[in-house]
Image: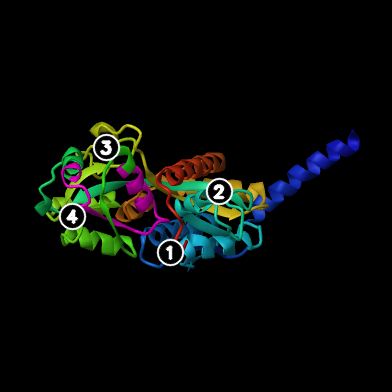
Amino acid sequence: MLRLALAIVLSAVLGTALAQGFPSRPLRILVPFPPGGGTDVAARALGEHLYRELGQPVVVDNRPGGNSVIATEALARAEPDGHTLLLTTDFHSINAAFGAALPYDSLKDFAFVARVSTSPLMLVTHPAAGLKSLADAVAAARASPGKLSFASLGTSSPHYLGFEWFKRMAKLDLIDVPYKGGGPALAAVMGGQVTLSFVVAANGIRQAKAGKLVALAVTGPARASVAPEVPTFAESSYPEFVLLNWYGILAPAGTPRTSIARLNGSIVAGLKTTQVQARLESAGVDAAPGTPEELEAWVRNDIARYRRMIELTGAKPEGR
């Protein structure tokens, strides 16, 4: 019993010492997308806060490619000491939901640190289409099967999966026009080359207020903070249709809990500051801090949600 008691005391002392000594060198945040996008903005905003909070420089390391697999694999192989992190998104859930062979286990190979943000998508159309509401879009699509088009971002994107899910829910026949990113898709609907598109809510409402788009509905469970005047899909007769993009911070599995706790505390504190919130809002997302346990539960539920979408739509991952 004495040895057990001593072991417990030593473990607690060692844990405290590790927490006090962390971080001991610069931190690195891997970002699975190119510089300039929302994930990059969020990582840099958090990095600046962590530098002030933890006293170590933070390097943002953009590793685009493979629908976020390249950056995620790099994290899985990193030293589990808390100094290498990943700012990931719902692509992490989608890759797992497809069930394709990945060079890591999407749950077991990672420690969950903190949820960063959530954001709904917005369904938009060009003013010349003459559509003023989601009901108008559904009626027009049903009146002209196979005539209306929507801009997708590839079969492994939440935009594509969400739209395919809604097509089946509303029994619509629409033409899928794939684009290589959100920017080209937004430009296509603004130019009238496609009828409909899902876009980041902040971008959509900005163009709607400028008269270049019409905002039809948002995909969140409640109206978007950036567009309180735009109804949700649930308010528009589709209560089951809820889709939220998210950002979260992961570390390699085996990272000490004391380091995870310190990182979570610092990240959550940053997400409550007006400076970080403003940077996130400029990227079109809302701060949504949470505990490591809440992020893990969120990811597990998100994987299950996308798995149901894939089963319903028969979608295949990119390149298959």
The residue pinned by badge 1 equals 33
Q: Amino acid at mark 1?
A: Phe
The residue pinned by badge 2 equals 113
Label 1 neighbour load within 10 Å: few <14, some 14-19, many 20+ = many
Q: CA distance from mark 3 to mark 4?
A: 18 Å
Q: CA distance from mark 2 to mark 3?
A: 30 Å
Tell me the SS state at disc 1: loop
Hey, which quadrant is residue 8 in on the image? top right
Residue 36 appears in the figure: yes
Mark 3 touches mark 4? (CB < 8 Å) = no
Scheme of colours in the image = rainbow
Quadrant where the N terminus sits is top right
Along the polypeptide, which appears first: circle 3 or circle 1? 1
Along the polypeptide, which appears first: circle 1 or circle 2? 1
Tell me the SS state at disc 4: helix
Q: Is residue 197 magenta?
A: no
Q: Which residues are drawn in magenta?
A: 141-167
Along the polypeptide, which appears first: circle 3 or circle 4? 4
For the point 16% across and 43% down, the residue is 143
For the point 33% across and 41% down, the residue is 168
Along the viewing direction, whichever of 243 and 248 lies nearer the viewer: 243
The residue pinned by badge 3 equals 232
Along the polypeptide, which appears first: circle 2 or circle 3? 2
Between disc 1 and disc 2, the foreground one is 1
Residue 21, x across and y down, in percent: 66, 56
The residue pinned by badge 4 equals 207
Q: CA distance from mark 4 to mark 2?
A: 35 Å
Tell me the SS state at disc 3: loop
Along the viewing direction, whichever of 29 and 195 lies nearer the viewer: 195
Residue 52, x across and y down, in percent: 48, 58
